[in-house]
Amino acid sequence: GAGVSQSPSNKVTEKGKDVELRCDPISGHTALYWYRQSLGQGLEFLIYFQGNSAPDKSGLPSDRFSAERTGGSVSTLTIQRTQQEDSAVYLCASRQALSTDTQYFGPGTRLTVL
Amino acid sequence: AQSVTQPDIHITVSEGASLELRCNYSYGATPYLFWYVQSPGQGLQLLLKYFSGDTLVQGIKGFEAEFKRSQSSFNLRKPSVHWSDAAEYFCAVGSTTSGTYKYIFGTGTRLKVLA
């Protein structure tokens, strides 16, 4: 079966532009996470979706960042008015319902803001 | 607050040598612990996980880790390293905060393997 997929794999944009990053989780996985990985840093939690519950947005660094998950499947992370400090790899992960289930990661989207 | 510390940013070992990557955590209850590996340009792959029971956990690719509650550690080991093990390794703690199950990651250890 297919794993977690993300698109695009690379995105170069100019400062001030908006970008959308897409995540297709594994079918049937109810939990979905977005992380940001900056050079030399660990993974920074951004947002968490679990089923039909309200998402946990506590990790979003500013109001320029938002995410949605449509139909409990595909998720889109949107960054408005991008800044150079937004340059990073954005990773998506999904998991079945239980916290003891394995979290599977996508390959990431490398965002470069010029 | 929960935290994960990986004290070694870089480690270099010779192929065939043994390996130990250190991980220390701070967590108030019994933690769920994980080790992930990230090869260049790839996402993270789970090597092994600990939830309860036997404190020595076996994973994929010949890796194992030992949970030591008294030391708040979950070190990753491999008896004989292969060149293909060169990658970045992340330790993580899973915890529930305000009803959300989150993973807290260390900053990673980059492993270099010498031929």
Image (spheres, helix red, strand yellow):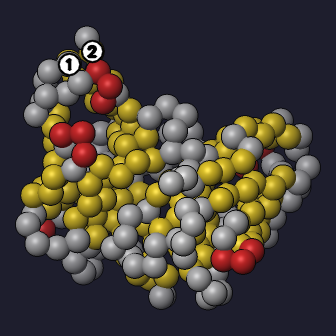
Tell me residue A15's x, y (percent). Answer: 88, 44
Disc with the residue nearer the chain's start (2 vs 1): 1
User: Nearest the camera: A5 or A39?
Assistant: A5
Mark 2 packing: few (<14 Cα in 10 Å), some, or many (20+)? some
Three-letter code for the amino acid on which mark 1 is drawn? Glu
Q: Secondary structure beneath disc 1?
A: loop
Tell me residue B87's x, y (percent). Answer: 38, 32
Q: Is residue B24 left or right of residue A7?
A: left
Three-letter code for the amino acid on which mark 2 is drawn? Leu
**In the image, which disc is placed on residue B15?**
1
**Is residue B22 visible in the rendered structure shown here?**
no
The residue that disc 2 covers is B114
Q: Is residue B72 above or below residue B60?
A: below
The N terminus of chain B lies in quadrant: bottom left
Callouts 2 and 1 in the same chain:
yes
Q: What residue is shown at x 24% (from left), y 39% (from top)? A: B61
Q: Is residue A22 left or right of residue B17?
A: right
Q: Secondary structure beneath disc 2?
A: strand
Mark 1 packing: few (<14 Cα in 10 Å), some, or many (20+)? some
Q: What residue is shown at x 38% (from left), y 76% (from top)? A: A99
Q: Among all residues in the image, which is located at the extreme top? A: B115
